[in-house]
Image (tube, rainbow, N blue to C red):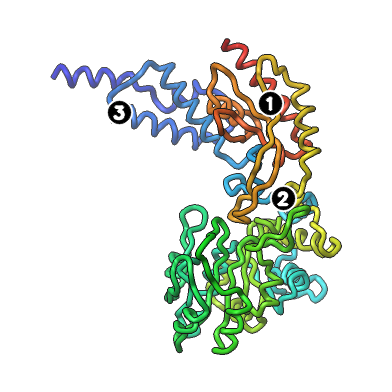
Amino acid sequence: MAAMGGRAHEFRKIPSVDQLLNDLGEAELARPLIAELARALTRELRQTGEVAAYPEILARLRSQVDGLSRSRLQPVVNATGICLHTNLGRAPLAEPAVRKLAEVAGGYCNLEYDPVQGSRSRRGGYAELCLKILTGGQAVIVVNNCAAALLLILHQTVREGKPEAVIARGDLVQIGGGFRIPDILRASGAVMREVGTTNRTTLADYRNALNPQTGMILRIHRSNFYMEGFVEIPVLKELAGLGAEFAVPVVFDQGSGAMLPPAGRPPQQEETTPPQALADGVQLTCFSGDKLFGGPQAGIVIGDAERISALRHNPLYRALRPDKLTLAALETTVETYLNTAKNHAPELPALTALGADVSPLQERGRQIMARVPTDALPIELEDTLVETGGGTMPRTKIPSVALAVATERETPAELARFCRLSQPPVVGYVAKKRFYLDLRTVFPDQDPILIDRLTALASWVAAKT
């Protein structure tokens, strides 16, 4: 009884939700969200039976509110050096695309309306026409991402009564977020016909697997890894020849959307472009819009007109089609390509960052260091090697420049956390017992933000010593 009485006494110390909300004061989040956090907190106190002093409870709620507020979408300064950082939104959009988004999002638009004829039109027709001209494909269809594009292609094969997809075991890859190609095949209803071994698959392996149930030969771009040594796999032109011989379509998941090598970089053997794939005889190829293509998230399928038409009439397409914002940004991105001289990199932020020379980055780094009190915060300018990210060009290491910060008392993780909690968050990385801010992915107009954050970091470090 005494124990129960003590527990009841503790429960009486639990504040009401209204009291917590009133004492919390002004907050950026909507009141119902904060109320739910408060209710969850009071439930936890009742379950554990351990009730702290009221100021501590209120502080816990304030911390939870702050954490939830920071989880909302917001701009960040990408100082990781990874241009296509999946966690940070991959390719930034060019300014014309941003303006187009604002124009379209703020009111009504002609998403499926022809102002000339005064009648309904096909969604995405203009973007598809531009992509057709850019890539040389007979036809184009756009969905909401590349995984959706592959799912749609596979599902259409199943609908046509030929459910088997012949695929090399070395192509059964895992992509970001834990998604695996075999899972996508199973979700579509398609049947995998695995051929070859992990490291070696011959044309004969593909040939021997073909049968009346074969709906396609499927090649998957090894976007986030590569194999060297005792390795063999037929090139696309050989597969296309085999497909033509047996009247079996060849589908290539190109993935990255690379239309040309990044400015100033040598061509990468593993980055076959979509136009090259079509020229090699592939019937369909799909790729992402927000990787090396430099646009919004989208899945773009190009190739044979009859097969694209079948995809368009597949009932699954309606669930996968893009919205007006995706199409607005995609239209503007493709226009940028079309208005750029052949074999030149278009002015898109991701491609510009990938092709930037090291010398200007070094000069920017020196200017930043000159404006930060480095006596309190030791900073060095260090040459680095970064990756493109986003599951693209896994062999490529790009020379870059970073501000390397290290102090005697604070750990690199503490320095990184301080910068992440700024407004906007500044995201770097920790390596070799240092905190790095790589300048390749920091836009020049964001340098003042770095200066401000590093100055604040210097003051924080000085105050702790």
Hey, which residue is sitting farthest front in the picture?
A: 230
Circles 2 and 3, Cβ within 8 Å, touching? The answer is no
Viewer-nearest of labels 2 and 3? 2
Viewer-nearest of labels 3 and 1? 1
Residue, disc 2 = 350
Viewer-nearest of labels 2 and 1? 1
Q: Taking 77 as reference, is 4 left or right?
A: left
Residue, disc 1 = 380
Foreground residue, 106 or 355?
355
Q: Give, as a three-letter code, the residue at label 2.
A: Ala
Q: Give, as a three-letter code, the residue at label 3.
A: Arg
Please tell me the numbered disc located at residue 46: 3
Residue 278 location (% of width, % of height): 68, 76
Q: Quadrant of residue 54?
A: top left
Hey, which residue is sitting farthest left in the picture?
A: 1
Circles 3 and 1, Cβ within 8 Å, touching? The answer is no
Q: Give, as a three-letter code, the residue at label 1.
A: Glu
Quarter of the image that includes the N terminus: top left
Residue at 50 percent across and 23 percent down: it is 22
Q: Helix, strand, or loop for circle 3? A: helix
Badge 2 density bin: few <14, some 14–19, many ≥20, Cα 10 Å: many
How far apart, in angstroms, are the residues tagged by discs 2 and 1?
Answer: 26 Å
- Could you tell me if residue 68 is visible in this image? yes
Among the two numbered marks 2 and 1 on one chain, the one whose residue lies closer to the N terminus: 2
Q: Quadrant of residue 260?
A: bottom right
Foreground residue, 258 or 65?
258
Among the two numbered marks 2 and 3 on one chain, the one whose residue lies closer to the N terminus: 3
